[in-house]
Image (cartoon, rainbow, N blue to C red):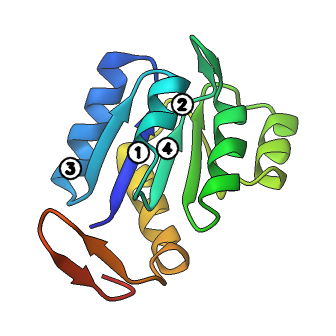
Amino acid sequence: MAKVLLLDDEVELREEIAAFLEKRGWTVDQAGTVAEFQARASDLAFAIIDVMLPDGSGFDAAVWLRARHRDCGIVMLTARGETPDKIDRLIGGADHYLVKPVKLPELDATLQALGPRVAHAWRLDFPGRLLSRPGR
C-alpha cells in the first residue's frame, strides 16, 4: 500500500499505530516533531498528524503539507475534540479529523476510504524501480 507519514510526539502511541498500520500493509514513516515531519514529507500519499507538538502546531503542519502536496490525504489525530477545532481543520485542508483515543481499525478504514482520491496518479518507486498505476 501507499506511504503514510505519521507525526506524533508520543513515542509509544506512534510506534503502536505504525506497527498496526504496517501489519495492515501500509508503509509507515514516523516523525516526532514538525521539523522532522517536514524533512520526511516527500513521496507520501497520506499523513496522520497530531496537533500539540513540542516544536509547533500540527494544524500548521497540515497547512504546510497541503500547500506542497495538494493530493495528499491528511488525517488529523488529536485529543482536541471540540467542534470548532474539527471545523477549522476540515475547512483548512484536512480530509478527516479523528479524536484520541482512536480505534486502530477505524484509522485504517479512514486511510482506505481516502485511497481512491489520493491514488489517482502514477507512482515511481526509485529503489525498487517499480512503476505503479493509479489505484495500486
Label 2: few (<14), some or many (≥20) within 10 Å?
few
- Give left or right: position of 3 versus 69: left
Q: Which of the numbered marks, if any, corresponds to residue 74? A: none
Question: Dot 4 lies on which element?
Answer: strand
Who comes first in sequence, dot 4 or dot 2?
A: 4
Question: Dot 1 lies on which element?
Answer: strand
User: CA separation, marks 4 and 2?
Assistant: 12 Å
Amino acid type of the residue tagged 4 in the rendering: Ile
- The answer to whether 58 is drawn above or below residue 29 in the figure is above
User: CA separation, marks 4 and 1?
Assistant: 6 Å
- The answer to whether 113 is drawn above or below residue 28 in the figure is below
Q: Pointers 4 and 1 in contact (CB under 8 A)? A: yes
User: CA separation, marks 2 and 3?
Assistant: 20 Å
Residue sitting at 88 percent across and 37 percent down? Answer: 84
Amino acid type of the residue tagged 3 in the rendering: Glu
Label 3: few (<14), some or many (≥20) within 10 Å?
some
- Pair 3/1: label in front: 1
Residue topped by disc 1: 5
Res. 26 visible in picture = yes
User: CA separation, marks 3 and 1?
Assistant: 12 Å
Who comes first in sequence, dot 3 or dot 1?
A: 1
Please state the horizontal and vertical placement of residue 39, each as a whole percent of the image: 45, 35
Residue topped by disc 3: 22
Nearest to the observer: residue 40 or residue 13: 40
User: CA separation, marks 4 and 3?
Assistant: 14 Å
User: CA separation, marks 2 and 1?
Assistant: 18 Å
Please state the horizontal and vertical placement of residue 98, each as a whole percent of the image: 59, 43
Residue topped by disc 2: 100
- The answer to whether 99 is drawn above or below residue 132 in the figure is above
Q: Pointers 2 and 1 in contact (CB under 8 A)? A: no
Q: Which of the numbered marks, if any, corresponds to residue 48? A: 4
